[in-house]
Amino acid sequence: MRGASQIRRSFFLAVVFLFGFFLGAQELIDRVVARIENDVILLSDVRLLSHYQLLVEGKTESDSEILDRLIDQWIVRSEANIARTPQPSDADIDRAVQRLVQGFSSQQDFEARRKLAGLTEVDVRRITADQLFLNSYLDSRFRPTVQVSEQAIQDFYKNSLLPRAQARGTSPPAFDTAHDFIQEALIQRGINEQADKWLKESHARLRVTKMLEESHP
């Protein structure tokens, strides 16, 4: 009986040791890299966005730059929740993911790049949904205040679109054909400019503590 008791005690100690080791490993794998108000941003959040950038752009920003993006997203998400911005529908997410896939040479190429980036299908869908949600709020907040004049559209066509077409040796689209696309591009630029200004002002009002040591996966 004493031998059995010793075995049970040894087994218990082994379990305790392994559990402690597991918790220690988890702490090494994931940790808090920023505190923002009463919330936190984890290293895993930085890694996830880094992997998504690798998928979409073929390269990633530094960890500190990604952390700044995540803080921006936290600000937008908080305001979007207060404004009760609706979540994107499954159909909206499907279309957005499909547009992402179309940026690759084939579905197989996309899948290979996704796996190489270390992302699951669920990861891609979740990040896509989050981006749609954040963009929807920014659009609803700032689009009404962006004014694009007809002269600005004409100037963009003359000074940007035409030179680019000439440099590529392609025929430029007619002004009437390109008009609405140029207008939307300028509106989006205006939204981005106003959002950037708003985010900088919001940063100054927040309690943010960064604890990120620059590293790479």
Image (tube, rainbow, N blue to C red):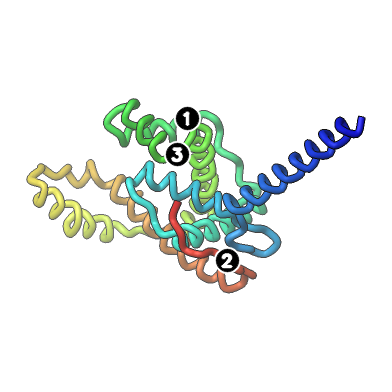
In the depicted view, which residue is nearer to us: 209 or 172? 209
Q: Amino acid at mark 1?
A: Asp
In the depicted view, which residue is nearer to us: 164 or 212? 212
Task: Tell me the residue at 72%/43% (across/down).
Answer: 19
Task: Tell me the residue at 23%/57% (across/down).
Answer: 156
Percent coordinates x, y for residue 208 in the rendering: 61, 68
**With respect to residue 212, does 25 lie above or below?**
above
Q: Amino acid at mark 2?
A: Met
Q: Which residue is mark 1?
A: 94
Q: Residue furthest bottom?
A: 204
- Identify the disc placed on residue 211: 2
Sequence-wise first label, 1 or 3: 1
Q: Crowding near pointer 3: few (<14 within 10 Å), some, many (20+)? A: some
Report the Cα–Cα distance between label 2 and label 3. Answer: 25 Å
In the depicted view, which residue is nearer to us: 47 or 125? 47
Mark 2 against mark 1, which lies toward the viewer? 2
Q: Secondary structure at mark 3?
A: loop
Q: Secondary structure at mark 1?
A: helix
In the depicted view, which residue is nearer to us: 13 or 143? 13
Taking 117 as reference, is 162 left or right?
Answer: left
Taking 54 as reference, is 176 left or right?
Answer: left
User: Which image quadrant is residue 112 in?
Assistant: top left
Q: Which residue is mark 3?
A: 118
Q: Amino acid at mark 3?
A: Gly
**With respect to residue 68, does 77 lie above or below?**
above
Taking 98 as reference, is 171 left or right?
Answer: left
